[in-house]
Amino acid sequence: MTRGYDTFGVGGSGPVDGAVLSAGIDALGVTLTDRGDVSDAQVVASDVAQDVTVRASSSQLVTVSNLRPTVDTYLRRDQGTTSFGTAATMEAKANTAVVNNQRHAYIGWNLGAILGAGFASASGGTALLTVSHNGVGSQSLFFEVYTHTSQPFSDTSTWNANEPPPGTLRQSSSSVSVPAGAASSVSLSIIGAAFRASEWTYLRLLGNTSIGGDTVLFTIVSSEGATSPRLTINSVQV
């Protein structure tokens, strides 16, 4: 699913003005004037329709949380001309032994549009996903994190045309443990270098690439589903 965002920026000088904050929420353009006077973890702006929450700290940093993906989809090698951008779930499967059976899921955020031109840096972040699998016991879901200067994939992307999408690899060989049984919430840790001004950040979910786990099929709830992926970006400097 593809979502649109208005520009969101934080900055300015002077006392915190509640009227300015209220006026800025609708456009996701928050003017936070004297961040040193704001208590830690105080919610200064949120927008339910856009699923964005901004928290300010006395260290003059902000945490941006609850970000739904701008776009997400998955690609299947055995259905190389088919797109799955409107599916309620995505799939990831390494299956290195069977060449035509790989499935990769992609989840992207247009940080250039969400954070605005004033974004300078972040200490890191987490992506919260709802995931299940058909394997035995806990299984490792491997993932990579990329950045790109323009939209790297869309709802209509296909394996033949778009695998792999363009971008710069910022984080590789990372994994998260997914328990057996019903779908669970898992948190993927993302390094600060994966958040860059005026660029997209996206996840590439590969499945379990370890020996013996590559046939496990992971199912991930997409932004079309009831428990959409969510992104939190920590210690944002603007």
Image (cartoon, rainbow, N blue to C red):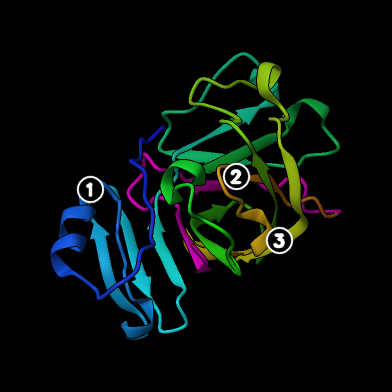
Q: Which residue is mark 3?
A: 175
- Depth check, front residue: 198 or 224: 198
How packed mark 1 is, by other alpha carbons closer than 10 Å (few <14, some 14-19, many 20 or more), is few
Q: CA distance from mark 2 to mark 1?
A: 22 Å
Residue furthest to the left: 19
- Depth check, front residue: 225 or 213: 225
Looking at the figure, which quarter contains the N terminus?
Answer: top left
Q: CA distance from mark 2 to mark 3?
A: 15 Å
Q: Secondary structure at mark 1?
A: loop
| Residues in magenta, as a range | 211-238
Asked whether disc 1 touches disc 3, contact meaning CB atoms under 8 Å apart, the reply is no
Tell me the tag on residue 49. Answer: 1
Residue 146 in picture, x, y percent from top left: 68, 45
Apparent side of residue 106 relative to residue 15 in the rendered image (left or right): right
The rendered magenta stretch, by its main secondary structure, is classed as: loop
**Within the magenta stretch, is there residue 125?**
no
The residue located at (67%, 16%) in the rendering is: 161
Identity, as a three-letter code, of the amino acid under mark 1: Ala
